[in-house]
Image (cartoon, helix red, strand yellow):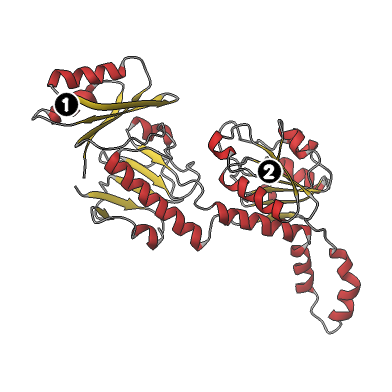
Amino acid sequence: MTYQVKTFNAIAKRGLDTFSSDFQINQTNNADAYLIRSVNLRDAQFPGSLKTIVRAGAGTNNVPIHRATEAGIAVFNTPGSNANAVKELVISLMISASRNIFAANEYSNDHVGADISKRTEVDKTKFNGTELMGKKLAVIGLGHVGSLVAEAALELGMNVIGYDPYLSTDAAWNINNHVDRSKTIKQAVKDADYVTVHVPKNNETDKLIDRDVVTAMKNGSILFNYSRLGIVDNEVALEAVLDKKLKYYVTDFGEPIIADQPNVIITPHIGGSTLEAESNGATQAATTIMRYLETGDTIQSVNLPGMKVPFEAPYRFTIIHQNVPNMVGQITTILARIGINIASMSNAAKKDTAYTIIDVDNLNDNSSELLQQIDKIPEVYRARLIKHK
């Protein structure tokens, strides 16, 4: 079977080269899969053929998740693909802010006269900075990026405290045991010389760093936001900088309120913008598209439960449906009525959405009718038949 993939934005060649010959790229708008980066799909109309949207990056705030789910579209991201890029940028900015590099560069550009050597010898003490060794870093969010930042900070001789109430068991294994754990965000930031935020954007993290948190921070500390716009309350952060509560506020997400403000350093959303990160994200995204379309596995899905089921039978049915009672019973009753025997079955739920995988050894001439009958169940979003390669 041939699958159609439509790309948006520039996708790294290594990622496109990952696709097998069974996948055609940008041959039609009626695609089976969208491979995206930053394109805004919130108001997009999706073709009926579309089965999955995969973002080559971590965030999915440019995708209408709820509407995609109701259309039976599995949404994925590529967490961790740009984690090293963000880590390196945060560490480099931590050093730059500590050593007042930005102010020193501005001074040097303004003083290029003949007496520059004598003058700078007098003025350079204005830019005396501090070293990272022995300083305390609070890492808010210990996922893919936060854990790498914490590890790098430890290697630089810093003391690191982390806060992440949603840390998964798998992620916890990757955290260095020298990272202290805080039970509250205020406890994490209160003695920190640096605070860096690495959490996903959702209702719970909107304005996570608010006035109460900033007030709890140490005077003269430096705050970094390399997660998403809105996780730090920019108005509060600016007030803290102007009041000299914060020495610097450094962020990847500019908006008018913080533009052209002293000691506010803004980069243009370049946290994950390296050639390596773009290539990693594209490759991971391509692999995810192939795996989902060819097997139905949903590892790293943001709207479906993560399932990875060995595909050993000749045929597989996958059903995306509401997480309500008797759904599996209705589906298996239809299979039994048409005379199809189940070889194996798996089911899992993620909040209001459930996903069922049914493997069968044989199909009869009524397989198309089977899909139609399952699709007619009001609570079913999409039913799909996959043939084993």
Cα–Cα gap, marks 2 and 1 = 51 Å
> Which image quarter: residue 237?
top right
> Which image quarter: residue 69?
top left
Residue, x 41% and y 39% (percent of image)? Answer: 299
Residue, x 13% and y 21% (percent of image)? Answer: 338
| Residue 370 numbered tag | 1
> Could you tell me if residue 353 is visible in this image?
yes
Does residue 27 appear left or right of residue 217 in this picture? left
Does residue 46 appear left or right of residue 278 in this picture? left
Q: Amino acid at mark 2?
A: Val
Q: Residue 371: image x %, image y %?
A: 19, 28
Label 2: element kind: strand
Residue denoted by label 2 = 139
Farthest residue toward the right? 122
Callout 2 crowding tier (Cα within 10 Å): few <14, some 14–19, many ≥20:
many
Residue, x 21% and y 25% (percent of image)? Answer: 342
Q: Amino acid at mark 1?
A: Leu
Tell me how many marks there are: 2
| Residue 5 numbered tag | none
Label 1: element kind: helix
